[in-house]
Image (cartoon, grey):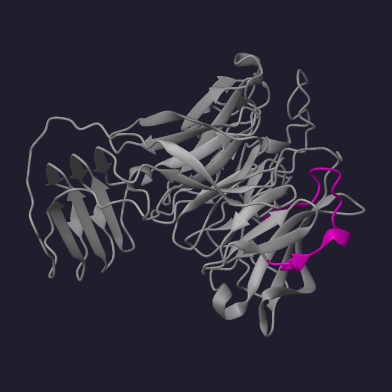
Amino acid sequence: MNTPNKYTFYFISFFFLTKIYAQPPTLSLEIYQTGLTRPTNIQSAGDSRLFVSEIGGKIKIIQNNSILSTPFLDISSKVEDTQWAGINSFAFHPNYAENGRFYVLYIRKPDNVVQLSQFRKSVGNANLADTTETRLLTIPHVLNIGHRGGAICFGADGYLYISTGDDADGGRGTVGDPFNNAQNLSKLFGKVLRIDVNANNNTYAIPASNPYQMPNDGIRDEIWARGLRNPWRMSFDRSTGDLWIGDNGQDGWEEIDFLAKDAPSGANFGWRCYEGNHRYLQPVCEDSISMTFPLHEYAGFTNNGGAGRSVIGGFVYRGQQFPAMYGHYIYADYISGNFWALRRNPNGGYQNAAQSISLSSPVTFGEDWQGELYTASFSNGNIYKIKAQNCPSSITLTSFDPITSNNTFNASNSINATNAIANAINVTYTAGNSVELKPGFTAAQGSVFSAKIGTCPTAP
C-alpha cells in the first residue's frame, strides 16, 4: 500500500476475507421537474442549473426547482421535428465558463440532414444563448426516417465525440443496414466521430491520433470508430475517462459497448457483421478477432416477445449522495421502461442487476455538476432524479473506482476498498463492522482519508 504524506486513521478494523460480494444498488426514481415537452437530453454547465433539450428545438433551464420561462436556446424554426427530427443532443465545452461555447446536434429543415453547430452564451445573461450559429459539420442522410444516432460529448482529451446511426429505417423483419454503411469507411454513418473544436472558432481540426489520415485514401478523417447501428446515447465515466455506448439492436439483441480510456482508436463494434455477439450478415467480413464485441448484451424484440427493444445508454455513477451506486453504470430500455445497474470487475466479467423500477419511455440520462444522475420520460415530459439506498449493507470499491473529489461512503456492515484516492481530497469510509483497505488501495499525496467503525448517518 502506498503511504501518503498526509492521512488520518480514526479506527480501522482489518478482516481478511476470502471473497466479498458487492451489494447491488436498489434504485428508485423521484420526480425532479415536470412540464417539459418530449425531452431528449440533460446536461450541466458546471453549476447548479440543469439544461434540458426538447425535440421540438428548445433548450430549457431548470433553476431553483423551476423551469425558467425563457428558453436558453430556441431553434424551433430550424428543426424538422415530426416526432424525432429535432434536437438530439447538446454539450457544453469543457471551458464553457471561460469561452461560453456549446454545441448542438439537430435535424435541420428543410433538407433533413444532421447538423452539428456551435453556439455561445449571451454576453451579460448567463441564462440566455446568442442565436448566432456556426455550422461545423453536416451529415446528409438518404432516408428521412433513417437512424441518425444522436449523442455528442467531450472526452477527457478535450475532443468532441459524435455518434451517428447507420441511416437505415430499422423496420422490424427487414434487413438491417442494407447499404452496409456502418462498415463503410467512406461514409460517416454508423460511426463515432472525433473532432477538435479548439483549433478554430469557425471550423474544426482532426486530432492527430485519429486512425484514418492517409492522404487520398477515401476515408473521412473524422472517423474514430465504426460498426454501430443506432448509438442514441453514449457517455464518458467522469472518473476514469472510459467510454460507454448504448447501441440499439435490429431485432434480436441490444448491446452495451465499452472502450477503456487508453484503448486505441479505430475500434470496430461489428454491425452489420454482428448484432451483439451474434453473426448477423455478410459471410465475408473482417475476422472477428478485429471486432470489439459488447461488454453486455440483452435479448431484443424477437428474443423477448417484444418486451424490450431500444437500449438507452446511461452513465457510471460518481456522485456523493448514494454510495451504493458508486461505480455502477445505470441504463434503461425505452420500450420496456426497465432499468439496470451494471458493474465491471477488475478480474474480468461484470454483474448486471435488474431493477424493480420502470418508467414510461426513458429517453436519456444526465449528470449534474456533482455527478448525481437524472433520467427523462419522452412521453410525460418529467425529469427524475435517480436514487439508491444511502446505507447499503456493504460497499466494494475496486481499481475501477478511483475517487477524484471529496466523498463519503457509508455501509451498515462492511467496506472493502482496493481503489485509489486519486487527488488531494477528503474521503471518509464508515461501516458498522469492518473497513478493509487491501493491497491495491492508494491515496494521493495531500489526501486525507478516514476509516471509521460506526453507524450510517441518518438520511436527510
Residue 460 position within the rendered picture, expressed as x and y whole percent measured from the top left:
36, 55
Could you say which is closer to the camera, residue 256 or residue 393? 393
Q: Is residue 360 above or below residue 217?
A: above
The rendered magenta stretch, by its main secondary structure, is classed as loop
Instruction: Judge whether residue 161 can be spotted in this image.
Output: no
Instruction: Judge whether residue 310 can be spotted in this image.
Output: yes
**Residue 178: quarter of image:** top right
**Residue 172: quarter of image:** top right
Q: Which residues are magenta?
A: 68-89
Q: Is residue 71 magenta?
A: yes
Left/right placement of residue 388 relative to residue 248 reads: left
Q: Residue at x 64, y 31 (%)?
A: 310
Q: Is residue 36 magenta?
A: no
Residue 203 position within the rendered picture, expressed as x and y whole percent measured from the top left:
71, 70
Q: Residue at x 45, y 41 (%)?
A: 329
Left/right placement of residue 11 relative to residue 340 reads: left
Farthest bottom residue? 124
Could you say which is closer to the camera, residue 239 or residue 135? 239
Q: Is residue 455 above or below residue 183?
A: below
Q: Residue at x 54, y 27 (%)?
A: 287
Q: Residue at x 71, y 68 (%)?
A: 72
Could you say which is closer to the camera, residue 368 or residue 176? 368
Left/right placement of residue 265 relative to residue 22 reads: right
Q: How many marks?
A: 0
Residue 306 position within the rendered picture, expressed as x and y whole percent measured from the top left:
66, 18
Farthest right residue? 110
Residue 349 position within the rendered picture, expressed as x and y whole percent measured from the top left:
35, 30
